[in-house]
Image: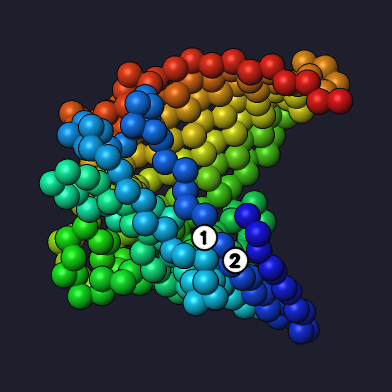
Amino acid sequence: MTSLRGRYYLGNWTFEGAVIPVFEQNILPVYNSRWNIFPQSLISLPVQVKKPSTVINNAQFAGKVSSSFSGWDFSVSYYRGFEKFPSVFVKSNSVIMEYRSLQVIGGDFAASFDKLGIRGEAGYFITDDFEGKILEVSDPYLLYVLGLDYKFSNLISEQDLYILCQWIQILPLPERDSLSESDLRYLFKRTVMLKADWSFTDYTKFSLQGIWRLHAEDIFLQPMLSSSLADGLNLEIGADLLYGKAGSFFESFKDNQRVFAKLKYNF
């Protein structure tokens, strides 16, 4: 990705800006992939992709101002560009995937109190269908995340336990009953995310990551044991587990559950 970024410091303030002249979309799973996210009824239809043309008016840019006060870090930001996921229009004999304009106004904060960390961030996503008149285009929405983390030192003997818990919610603004379960932008509409690291020694750690989507009643879990066997040699053994009620997002990929092992050597 080609981009230009600048940063300026003024006392306790940091001013940042970035320009991306050429649009690059997210890479989506192909139709015949085991992670395909499109309905089977669309797979046989030809696909036309509409991306923003490379002209000066379509250059994406973002700005951010950050600072700290009394132990609290905070920032505000703005982005003008295009959505990374397409709006899908189904015609009688084809599928059109169009990447439409997007603006995002954001902010975040973080602070630490001894072993307790507090964090939060929010973004207001302003799509180009503010009136909600185009069914295939996402309506504007607010996404926010609130989190707490804590480290229990020497919990058992010299073993440490680190826990991070986050709440994610997406709200349509203006208020509408428009958060479609099939729209990946709304995947974490009301979600709890958990990460726990239990360090047995300096070389061995058990980790658990989880995503629980309360609104859809489905869950993703990834337990993993990692160990440094020797200098530069690391082993990871884990599993990807997906559960949920019939038809939910994670349940639809239940056949992709797996147990994995990875041996990595750095030199």
Which residue, given by chain and number where applicable, does mark 2 sit on? 20
Quadrant containing the N terminus in the rendered view? bottom right
Give residue 117's position: percent from left, percent from top.
Answer: 59, 56
67 relative position to 78: left or right: right
185 relative position to 132: left or right: right
Q: How is the image coloured?
A: rainbow
Quadrant containing the C terminus in the rendered view? top right
Residue 79 is at least partly visible in this image: no
Which quadrant holds residue 162? top right
- Amino acid type, callout 2: Ile
Q: How dense is the environment of label 1, judged by Cα within 10 Å: few (below 14), some, or many (20 and up)? A: some
- Determine the secondary structure under disc 2: strand
127 relative position to 107: left or right: left
- Amino acid type, callout 1: Phe
Mark 1–mark 2 distance (CA, rounded to whole Å): 7 Å
Give residue 144's position: percent from left, percent from top.
Answer: 40, 62
228 relative position to 198: left or right: right
User: Mark 2 and mark 1 in contact (Cβ < 8 Å)?
Assistant: yes
Tally the numbered discs.
Answer: 2
Q: Residue at x 85, y 21 (%)?
A: 231
Above or below residue 238? Residue 149 is below
Q: Residue at x 39, y 33 (%)?
A: 30
Which residue, given by chain and number where applicable, does mark 1 sit on? 23
**Image mark for residue 40:** none
Which quadrant holds residue 157? top right
Q: Residue at x 52, y 55 (%)?
A: 24
Above or below residue 183? Residue 106 is below
In this view, the residue in front, 72 or 187, is: 187
Give residue 218's position: percent from left, percent from top.
Answer: 28, 34
Residue 198 is at least partly visible in this image: yes
Q: Residue at x 44, y 63 (%)?
A: 52
